[in-house]
């Protein structure tokens, strides 16, 4: 299995070169897709972990409102990776639709191992006993925590990517801030919800007509009739941001001390 999430952004020439380089092997292409209502908040948060300082409303405007030729690099990447119809069409022309597999991401209420079991079924290891307990979960941050990280990005100098990736993304975001109890989920603005509903319905209809192997249920990509209530970064108070910042600072200092003194972890009070 050759797998990397950045492969999804391959253009026509890159995809063709990949297929040619693997000949004469029987190549199968597996793509996972999730619903737009969950994808948009998750993708904005992920860009913040990669140094993005664009606010939630501004980033949505980049994705939804900006014409393709005027899109910022991050918006161009979003559509190159998440225009699922275009991605599947590209690979279907190279390896035939029957060997292109679309796995839909189950809802959060589904069993935790369902996505893995769908993938395992495609690659033929569904009967193999796999221990998933060691898998790292890409846990989401709370709204206050991701807004804190975004504002930090605004103030940080132009650090080398290796340094930012190790100390900000991996340590601060994935460890320190991810340990904080989660509050309300990120709210999709009401003025964007009709777009998500229409785009989701159009996406499902076009995917159904591609003839690729669908593993799961395309209706899992539908938008909800009623979007769950959450909160926005603009609604996060200064007190909440201060609390998150003090926690991050205290936890980072304690972790640094433990690394130097080689002590066992102790609890940090938020």
Image (spheres, rainbow, N blue to C red):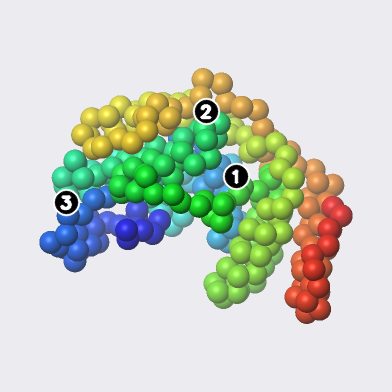
Q: Earlier in the sequence, mark 3 or mark 2?
A: 3
Query: Dot 3 lies on which element?
Result: helix
In the drawing, what numbered circle is on residue 74? none
Q: Nearer the viewer, residue 262 or 89?
A: 262
Left/right of residue 233 with respect to residue 21 in the rendered view: right
Q: Nearer the viewer, mark 3 or mark 1?
A: 3
**Residue 214 rendering spot, x and y as whole percentages:** 30, 35
Total number of numbered discs in the rendering: 3
Seen at 58% across and 34% down, the residue is 188
| Mark 1 closeness class: few <14, some 14–19, many ≥20 residues within 10 Å | many
Label 2 with label 1: CB-CB less than 8 Å: no
In the drawing, what numbered circle is on residue 56? 1
Residue furthest out toward the bottom: 260
Spatial separation of the CA atoms under disc 3 and disc 1: 37 Å
Q: Earlier in the sequence, mark 3 or mark 1?
A: 1
In the rendered image, which quarter contains the N terminus? bottom left
Q: Nearer the viewer, residue 223 or 128?
A: 128
Query: Dot 1 lies on which element?
Result: helix
Residue wearing tag 2: 193
């Amino acid at each position: 299995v050759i797998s990397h999430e950045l492969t999804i952004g391959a253009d026509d020439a890159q995809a063709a070169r990949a297929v040619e380089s693997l000949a004469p092997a029987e190549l199968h292409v597996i793509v996972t897709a999730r619903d737009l209502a969950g994808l948009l908040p998750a993708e904005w948060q992920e860009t913040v972990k990669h140094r993005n300082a664009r606010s939630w409303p501004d980033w949505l405007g980049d994705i939804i409102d900006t014409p393709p030729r005027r899109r910022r690099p991050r918006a161009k990447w979003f559509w190159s990776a998440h225009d699922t119809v275009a991605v599947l069409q590209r690979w279907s022309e190279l390896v035939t639709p029957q060997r292109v597999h679309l796995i839909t991401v189950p809802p959060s209420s589904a069993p935790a191992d369902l996505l893995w079991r769908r993938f395992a079924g495609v690659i033929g290891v569904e009967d193999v006993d796999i221990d998933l307990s060691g898998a790292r979960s890409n846990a989401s941050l709370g709204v206050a925590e991701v807004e804190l990280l975004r504002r930090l990005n605004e103030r940080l100098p132009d650090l080398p990517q290796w340094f930012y990736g190790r100390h900000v993304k991996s340590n601060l975001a994935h460890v320190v801030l991810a340990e904080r109890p989660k509050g309300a989920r990120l709210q999709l603005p009401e003025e964007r919800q009709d777009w998500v509903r229409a785009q989701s319905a159009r996406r499902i209809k076009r995917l159904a007509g591609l003839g690729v192997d669908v593993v799961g249920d395309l209706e899992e990509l539908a938008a909800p009739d009623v979007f769950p209530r959450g909160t926005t970064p603009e609604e996060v108070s200064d007190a909440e941001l201060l609390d998150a910042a003090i926690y991050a600072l205290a936890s980072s200092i304690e972790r640094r001390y433990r690394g130097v003194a080689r002590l066992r972890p102790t609890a940090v009070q938020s």
